[in-house]
């Protein structure tokens, strides 16, 4: 359904004042067709409402159904369009019409992400700002970004998208319907690095070798990375950047960095995609050949484009963390205001109760009987005294609670605001 024109009311007012269509066009600067249709509709209906639509009225996507779906999604946003369509006995197409067209919602896929607490966010903010400050002098253009990745020989298949077309189940199994997986498939670890104007050759880790600090330092850095960097950069200053793997953070490795590299820092960055294959299994040798081919196919302009986007990505990280920090501060301020309002409301209620007890105490005090008298009210004297003592005890308890609440409120107001990183 098309939304009404925002000029509808103004056009109707001009028609009421006796203006012609040409005069309305010059005044409002709108289409003549819009003015003609609006004026014709107004003369026919006498109001600014829409004309009654032709065709069969909606019997499934009714306002009641739209409201029910909206409330169902509001209670639990994690919903399946297919299951909701089955529950409300309608087609999946009509349910998608309600969700997308009527409610203006989009079903997003759930994604996995790293769990970040406040300490991690604060640490990432500091690192992002430090790295962003380093890009002001263009040092990121002479930074060697390195990373390693493990590739397995198992087929990269997803049963929902990859199908086997066959006449029956048996022939489908013969053609490769069943993907045989092992607990520990054969794999190969690859180490590589990129910079703004080049990339290192792929460095394959020997099969069955655990990459500890000794192997990483002697076989990868000393034999492959450092010679390539010295040849590529020459006498230019450059930066070596990597992630925080245990072999990278070892004390001996850090000392070797300081002795051989200009400076070092840490960052995780990935570039090489997984080579896809239609074969059921890939030999290790063929996998290495495919990786080298993919690596050589990367254009020299691509690392430069990735490097140029490096400051933008750091700014995006900083903005996202700042937004999360501001939201947390707003929630904390709202919580503090709510706590103050609750304490003030409780104190007011205690004051009202004290005033009510005082009025009740003053109104229920019976007259003192004459000495030795034995009138009708003498029998009530004992019970009234007990009632007065109970009221006095309740009053004292409320006064103590009121003082305690006031002390807590004063301490809460004098307490300094908590910082986000605390």
Image (cartoon, helix red, strand yellow):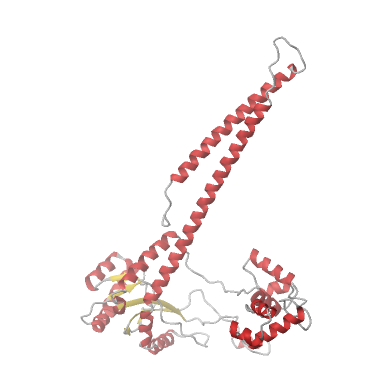
Q: Residue furthest front?
A: 18
Q: Where is residue 112 in the image (x, y as percent from the top left)?
A: 51, 70
Residue at x 46%, y 45% (from the top left corner): 413
Q: Is residue 116 visible?
A: no
Residue at x 40%, y 74% (from the top left corner): 313
Q: How many labels does the image show?
A: 0
Q: Which one is in front, 103 or 170?
A: 103
Q: Position of residue 301 (x, y in %)?
A: 36, 87
Q: Residue furthest left?
A: 235
Q: Which one is in front, 377 or 135?
A: 377
User: Quadrant of the image for the N terminus?
Assistant: bottom right
- Residue 56 sits in quarter: bottom right
User: Quadrant of the image for the C terminus?
Assistant: bottom left
Residue 33 placement, left or right of 306: right
Q: Which one is in front, 159 or 204?
A: 159
Q: Position of residue 93 (x, y in %)?
A: 69, 80
Residue 333 placement, left or right of 222: right
Q: Is residue 138 visible?
A: yes
Residue 279 placement, left or right of 263: right
Q: In this view, does 164 lie above or below 81?
A: below
Residue 178 placement, left or right of 223: right
- Residue 359 sits in quarter: top right
- Residue 151 sits in quarter: bottom left
């Amino acid at each position: 359904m098309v939304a009404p024109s925002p000029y509808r009311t103004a056009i109707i007012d001009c028609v009421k004042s006796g203006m012609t269509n040409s005069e309305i066009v010059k005044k409002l600067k709108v289409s003549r067709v819009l003015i003609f249709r609006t004026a014709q509709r107004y003369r026919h209906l006498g109001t600014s409402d829409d004309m009654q639509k032709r065709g069969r009225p909606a019997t499934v996507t009714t306002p009641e159904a739209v409201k029910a779906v909206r409330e169902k999604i509001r209670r639990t946003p994690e919903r399946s369009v297919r299951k909701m369509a089955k529950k409300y006995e309608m087609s999946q197409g009509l349910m998608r019409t309600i969700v997308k067209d009527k409610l203006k919602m989009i079903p997003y896929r759930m994604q996995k992400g790293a769990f970040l607490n406040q300490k991690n966010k604060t640490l990432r903010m500091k690192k992002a700002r430090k790295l962003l400050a380093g890009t002001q002098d263009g040092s990121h253009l002479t930074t060697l970004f390195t990373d390693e990745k493990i590739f397995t020989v198992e087929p990269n298949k997803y049963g929902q998208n990859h199908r086997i077309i066959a006449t029956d189940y048996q022939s489908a199994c013969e053609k490769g319907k069943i993907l045989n997986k092992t607990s520990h498939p054969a794999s190969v670890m690859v180490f590589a690095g990129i910079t703004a104007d080049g990339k290192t050759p792929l460095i394959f880790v020997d099969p069955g070798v655990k990459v500890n600090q000794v192997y990483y330092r002697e076989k990868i850095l000393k034999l492959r990375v450092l010679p390539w960097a010295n040849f590529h950069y020459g006498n230019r200053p450059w930066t070596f950047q990597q992630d925080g793997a245990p072999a990278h953070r070892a004390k001996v490795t850090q000392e070797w960095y300081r002795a051989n590299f200009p400076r070092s820092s840490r960052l995780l960055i990935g570039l090489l995609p997984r080579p896809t294959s239609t074969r059921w299994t890939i030999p290790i040798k063929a996998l290495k050949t495919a990786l080298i081919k993919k690596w050589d196919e990367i254009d020299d302009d691509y690392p430069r484009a990735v490097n140029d986007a490096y400051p933008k990505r750091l700014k995006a990280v900083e903005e996202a963390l700042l937004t999360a920090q501001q939201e947390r501060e707003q929630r904390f301020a709202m919580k503090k205001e709510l706590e103050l309002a609750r304490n003030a409301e409780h104190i007011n209620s205690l004051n009202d109760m004290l005033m009510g007890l005082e009025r009740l105490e003053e109104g229920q005090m019976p007259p003192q009987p004459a000495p030795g008298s034995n009138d009708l009210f003498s029998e009530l004297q004992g019970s009234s005294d007990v009632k007065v003592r109970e009221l006095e005890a309740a009053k004292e308890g409320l006064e103590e609670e009121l003082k305690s609440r006031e002390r807590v409120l004063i301490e809460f107001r004098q307490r300094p605001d908590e910082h986000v990183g605390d």
